């Protein structure tokens, strides 16, 4: 349980740092959004640990976290969408 949590932590940090870097000029920094990527990545890593080879777990977690977060933002979030230009 320790190994996938560490892999998920680093995958989440990668996604969170990149998201903060690209979004801060437009949206500002929110600790909640930053931590969301980390927590989701840890959960995904723990769930997928027995199904994905350890050498591939990091990129798979990065991809699954992005997919999950973008689906959440696109379909379920109730925040005003006016500030986003899609």
Image (spheres, helix red, strand yellow):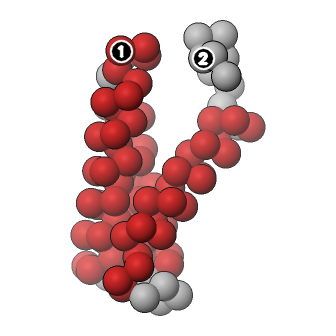
Left or right: where 10 falls relative to 52: left
Identify the residue at horizontal 69%, vertical 35% (top origin): 74
Give me the C-alpha separation between circle 1 and circle 2. 13 Å
Left or right: where 14 falls relative to 72: left
Above-or-below relation of 10 to 66: below
Q: Nearer the viewer, residue 2 or 26?
A: 26
Residue holding disc 2: 84
Above-or-below relation of 44 to 32: below
Which element is circle 1 on?
Answer: helix
Left or right: where 60 falls relative to 8: right
- Farthest top residue in view: 82
Left or right: where 43 falls relative to 76: left
Above-or-below relation of 57 to 14: below
Quarter of the image for residue 20 reads top left
Q: Nearer the viewer, residue 63 or 38?
A: 63
Quarter of the image for residue 59 reads bottom left
Q: Residues within 10 Å of mark 1 (few under 14, many from 20)?
A: few
Percent position of residue 68, x then y? 59, 52
Percent position of residue 25, x then y? 35, 15
Q: Residues within 10 Å of mark 2 (few under 14, many from 20)?
A: few
Residue holding disc 1: 25
Percent position of residue 79, x then y? 63, 21
């Amino acid at each position: 349980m320790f190994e996938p949590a560490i892999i998920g932590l680093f995958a989440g940090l990668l996604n969170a740092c990149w998201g903060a870097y690209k979004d801060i000029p437009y949206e500002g920094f929110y600790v909640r959004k930053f931590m969301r990527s980390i927590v989701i990545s840890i959960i995904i890593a723990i769930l997928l640990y027995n199904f994905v080879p350890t050498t591939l777990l990091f990129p798979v977690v990065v991809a699954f976290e992005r997919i999950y977060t973008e689906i959440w933002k696109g379909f379920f979030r109730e925040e005003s969408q006016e500030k986003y230009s899609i």
